[in-house]
Image (tube, rainbow, N blue to C red):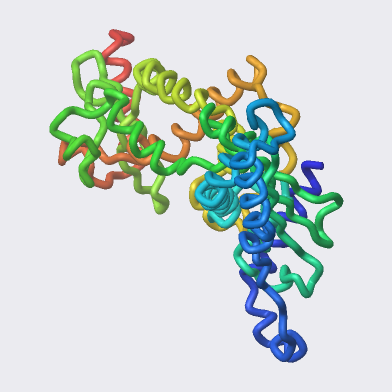
Amino acid sequence: MENKNIQINLHLKQLNQSNALGYNKDFIATSYDINFDILGKAFQGTGRKYAKLTMAIQNNNCVSENCEYERTQLSILQAAPQKALDFLSNVVSQLSVTEDSNFDPNNNFKYTVANSIFTNKPGFSKTHGYNIVLNILENSSLELIFSGPMFEEPLVLNSSALNGLEQSGTSIVAETPDVNALMLDLLPRTGLFTTEQLIDGQLSPTAVISDDFILKNPDGSFDYEIIDLGNGKGRNILRFDMDRITKKIMPFVNAEVAGIMSAEQDVVALWNVYISKGTSVEEDDQMVQNANAAGDSWSYEEDLPLSQSKKVLFEHKYVEYFMNNYLEQFTKNKLPLVEEDAVVFDLAEGKKAKAQKYIDDNNLN
């Protein structure tokens, strides 16, 4: 099912974003019926039913003791119009997630089809065989039924079920959290930067990691790595204590992941769209539709609730993603803080001098 979800969701995304139909003469010359008249049909005949119930109560001609059934049904009809509007608004809001740029195509494709019908996407009209029906049920809940060629069987949504899910913080379509926002919010809270590096709680454009996390020689000077610039030239770059950095950030990452874990469908969406493959932010942006979703993806139907092993794996990969895509920019190929140590030098001489300093610092003469 996961592969089918991915295939159909990606197909629908491409179809809905394509301009091809605008150049299809047959399509633009045909009239399509998009008036599903959802509310009109749902309340058709309710006036007569309302009057019949009212008369039964007034004439004490009820089928139930003390007209309990009639009063209940009358109350349901009175509340139904506003309840229907609220229900439809809730469904539209949840289905709209399928149009997000980072939408996880592992979500059930039926919701993408339903959204295409609701939003009058080309090819999803009544003329094409699609329909939406709203039913008012005797138990006071509402039922929305989507049908059409792409549904193996009608998609049925019940207002009471959706309300219950909403109260528990669950939705029918998983919204993928903004990983960039999460990571940028985490950076200034890692303790790697001094307060002078922050502006209103965010890193300043010139922020650098505190030199407490830069490796130093026994004499207190900075310990550099020499990189080869070619043509016999070299340059010093800072070396960072990555073990210490990792230990420093882990409590903050643990807290971050714990917060994300409070909504496990968010974990699955993040895993599928960003985290599982460990790709870079640039690679994610370049994907037609985040290719991470395939292969190692997790299923909303089969993998929730998440096992402890998956939680541990997610945290491990989350740290890896953070380190590779966000923290690395502060630790990779950084020039010395001491101006004279940042100049380009003869590579052979530089390596010789570094080796000699190591010997001197460690009394190896």
Question: Where is the C terminus found, in terms of image quarters?
Answer: top left
Name the residue at 71% across, 59% down. Answer: 132
| Front residue of this view, candidates 2 and 128 | 128
Residue 235 image position (x, y, % from top left): 31, 42
Q: Which image quadrant for residue 347? A: top left
Against 31, residue 354 (above or below) is above
| Front residue of this view, candidates 350 and 271 | 271
Against 284, residue 218 (above or below) is above
| Front residue of this view, candidates 20 and 56 | 56
Q: Is residue 247 left or right of residue 91?
A: left
Seen as rendered, the residue at the extreme right is: 152
Seen as rendered, the residue at the extreme front is: 59
Question: Where is the N terminus found, in terms of image quarters?
Answer: top right
| Front residue of this view, candidates 255 and 16 | 16
Task: State how many labels appear.
Answer: 0
Residue 31 image position (x, y, % from top left): 72, 85
Residue 78 image position (x, y, % from top left): 54, 46
Q: Which image quadrant for residue 300? A: top right
Q: Is residue 62 left or right of residue 284?
A: right
Name the residue at 56% across, 31% down. Answer: 267
Res 220 visible: yes
Residue 75 image position (x, y, % from top left): 56, 39
Name the residue at 47% across, 36% down. Answer: 324
Seen as rendered, the residue at the extreme left is: 196
Name the residue at 75% across, 29% down. Answer: 302
